[in-house]
Amino acid sequence: MTDTTEEIIDKLLDAALAHVPFDGWSEASFRAAIDDSGVEESVARAICPRGAVDLALAFHARGDRAMLERLQATDLDAMKIRDKIAFAVRTRLEVIEDREAVRRGVTLFALPAYAGDGAKAVWGTCDLIWTAIGDRSDDVNWYTKRATLSGVYSSTVLYWLGDDSLDHQATWEFLDRRIADVMLFEKFKAQVNGNPLLKPLLAGPNWLASQIKAPVRLTERQFPGQLTPRS
């Protein structure tokens, strides 16, 4: 029976993780993964044309899937929004089984050639978090929520990588402080928008912001450019 693309990536990734702590997400790790997994090199390079970079992204995606499984198995309805966010970010870090692989990934995606890939991966994680906790925004707030959470998530990951406290307690306290800062800013923004003296000055920017819409999420049967019949 022929392995699927996902199964081959999993084989390569599992094999690579034994080498990443020593060689990073590098060509050496990718070659070692090919040898250890038994995957044909031509197949491995067809599926992962950028080698270890693609495996690093696969490792990040694996963590996202594990996070979603835990979030979907948790009753989040009783939580406040800030608690939902903190729980989701904490869950995303707790599902990581190899902190050194993350450290090496941070180094890889700090390089100019791969910075875009790293930013996209973090944005994707934050989008999954907001969607999982029930965000329904479809305007400019869709972007600002994910951009803000990307900053919180990224700074928390960096703090977590250097945290040696018991059960990473210092990291969770750091995360709570970052979320508290964001909530204070949101409160300030609401006060500014509700100020009648500033309302005329904000009319232009608010109108412009109202024209920005969230990207359309395609279902399995939708494709870009497809016409949707009106009911």
Image (tube, helix red, strand yellow):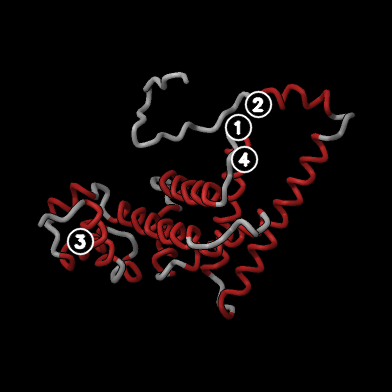
**What amino acid is labelled 1 in the image?**
Asp
**What amino acid is labelled 4 in the image?**
Thr
Identify the residue at image location x=66%, y=53%. Answer: 81
Q: Quadrant of residue 189?
A: top right
Could you tell whether 198 is left or right of 162 in the image? right
Q: Earlier in the sequence, mark 2 or mark 1?
A: 1
Residue in the foreground of this view, choosing between 221 and 167: 221
Cα gap from disc 3 to disc 4, whole angstroms? 40 Å
Residue in the foreground of this view, choosing between 112 and 97: 97
**What amino acid is labelled 2 in the image?**
Ser
In the picture of the structure, the residue carrying the numbered disc 2 is 210
The image quadrant where one finds the N terminus is bottom left
| Tag in front: 1 or 3 | 1
* Circle number at residue 144: 4
**What amino acid is labelled 3 in the image?**
Arg
In the picture of the structure, the residue carrying the numbered disc 3 is 31
Cα gap from disc 2 to disc 1, whole angstroms? 7 Å
Q: Position of residue 143 (x, y in %)?
A: 58, 38
| SS of the residue under disc 1 | loop
CB within 8 Å, label 2 to label 1: yes
Q: Earlier in the sequence, mark 1 or mark 4?
A: 1
Residue in the foreground of this view, choosing between 199 and 22: 199
In the picture of the structure, the residue carrying the numbered disc 1 is 139
Cα gap from disc 1 to disc 3, whole angstroms? 45 Å
Q: Earlier in the sequence, mark 3 or mark 2?
A: 3
Q: Position of residue 10 (x, y in %)?
A: 26, 60
Identify the residue at image location x=67%, y=63%. Answer: 176
Q: Position of residue 128 (x, y in %)?
A: 49, 49
| Tag in front: 3 or 2 | 2
Question: Around disc 3, counting alpha carbons within 10 Å, would you say few (fewer than 14), some (14 to 19), or many (20 or more)?
Answer: some
